[in-house]
Image: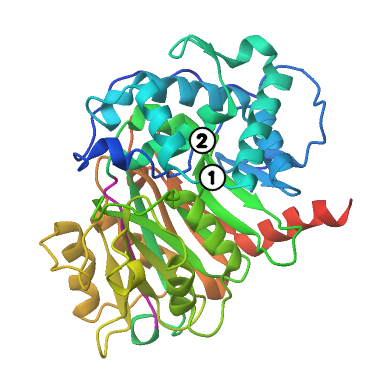
Amino acid sequence: MQHNRENGDESPHSKEGRSLMIVRRPALAVVALVGLLAGASCSSARAVEKLAGRLETRQGVSILFLHGTPRENGYAQGYLLAKRVTVLFENAFERIGDFAAGVNYEQLSRLTQVILKTSERERAEAEGIIAGIRDRLGPDGLKSKALGRELSADDVLNANALPDLGRMGCSSFAAWGSRTADGGPIVGRNLDYFGREVFSGAHVLVVRASTEPNRRGWVALNFAGGIGVGTVINDAGTMVATHDSGGLRAMPAGQMRCRGFIVRDLVESLSGSGDVPDQAARFCRREPTSFATNLLIAPPSGPAGVLEYDQDVANQQGVTLRRPAKGEDWIVVTNHYRDRAAPYECPRYESLAEPLAAGRKLASTADGWDLITRASRDGTLQTVVYQPSMHKILLSFSTATTPAHKVKPVEFDIEELYKEAKAATDAE
């Protein structure tokens, strides 16, 4: 396995690109956050604060190992990925109109301050990112041409909210029992979004070891500067994947939370045993979300489920748990509800559901790859297949010119990644 310390900057990306879909009521949808963004190693500056992490490149994939407090996580990310974070933020802030027509950055900032509920942990991490960038690049490294000033922690939080403005077209499946060779689950996931030439330089695989007894560690496919998560597997073996499902479906009664932040808290709480989808549903009913969402909940054994999740708390407290149909050892999710509202035709959904319904059996991550890439598209930024019984993930990240499914995938043992991250905490 190729194994190198990462020390180079990514080149800036062009600003061309279009949104895949139009968001309903974009000014209010602004407040949800898909926290994702990442950065690059830069100059020879020395860290001033404790550096609770390291950055490596393996098989062409940037891997960010983190441990410690939220502030320390943020500082390590900001310091180690400084250039990639600032380049991504600059491109994103210059392209606000691509996310929501008629919304400029100052309007976005005011809306998030009023509508967005941010925890002390999330703010501490955002402040850590800014401190890490400053210590790596110097004060000039925080200057933003798009904003005409230095970046702040509020800008980090606003940047994490941007993906909920431009709808994602993601697809996932989970199969188990009669649909896999050993009866254990195989899960596939595409993250689809616009702006491949912007986001492709910011991919990072984040491995976080938890130092808190009530919070689990996790591995996430993310982007530089990301605080929230959208595709993530915790150290109990449960995977959660986020999919858009229709924007704002009801007027909120109060402040809402970004999806990426909810999913991070959720995955840090979930076990790998019992009725994990029901555990997830009960958790999400306590968290008002900013954007209608389908969450795939795939435990390391047993059936997966989908949370159809929005602001309509009068309907099952905002969450409908969709189970597999009777006799089906599989479930598929794209961008429409199937229980909470009438489903509509989706070619990506059918491309995954039809082979599974016809009896297709999967034996490996390679088989899962063959299936999930049937639903891939030109805007696919990340593709991953997860096989819990083997502790394996098979993944690919897009490049500026090539969608993820056309990039040769690489495999990692996530159990080994967790052990490496945990070793850093044990050494302190």
User: Which corner quadrant of the image does residue 324 belong to?
Assistant: bottom left
From this viewpoint, which residue is outermost toward the left? Answer: 345
Q: Which mark is nearer the camera, 2 or 1?
A: 1
Q: Is residue 194 above or below residue 289?
A: above
335 or 23: which is nearer to us?
23
The residue shown at (58%, 75%) is 271
User: Which corner quadrant of the image does residue 13 belong to?
Assistant: top left
Tag 1 secondary structure: loop
In the picture provided, is 37 more to the left or to the right than 373? right
Q: Position of residue 141 (x, y in %)?
A: 62, 14
In the picture provided, is 154 more to the left or to the right than 189? right
Q: Position of residue 70 (x, y in %)?
A: 69, 45
In the picture provided, is 190 more to the left or to the right than 412? left
181 or 94: which is nearer to us?
94
Q: Is residue 265 magenta?
A: no
Q: Is residue 358 above or below residue 314?
A: below
Q: Which residues are magenta?
A: 168-176
Residue type marked 2: Leu
In 3D space, how far apart are the residues under numbered discs 2 and 1 (Cα atoms)?
9 Å
In the picture of the structure, the residue carrying the numbered disc 1 is 118
Give the total number of marks visible in the rendering: 2
The residue shown at (41%, 29%) is 110
Q: Earlier in the sequence, mark 2 or mark 1?
A: 1
From this viewpoint, which residue is outermost toward the right? Answer: 428
In the picture of the structure, the residue carrying the numbered disc 2 is 157
Tag 2 secondary structure: helix
Tags 2 and 1 touching, CB below 8 Å:
yes
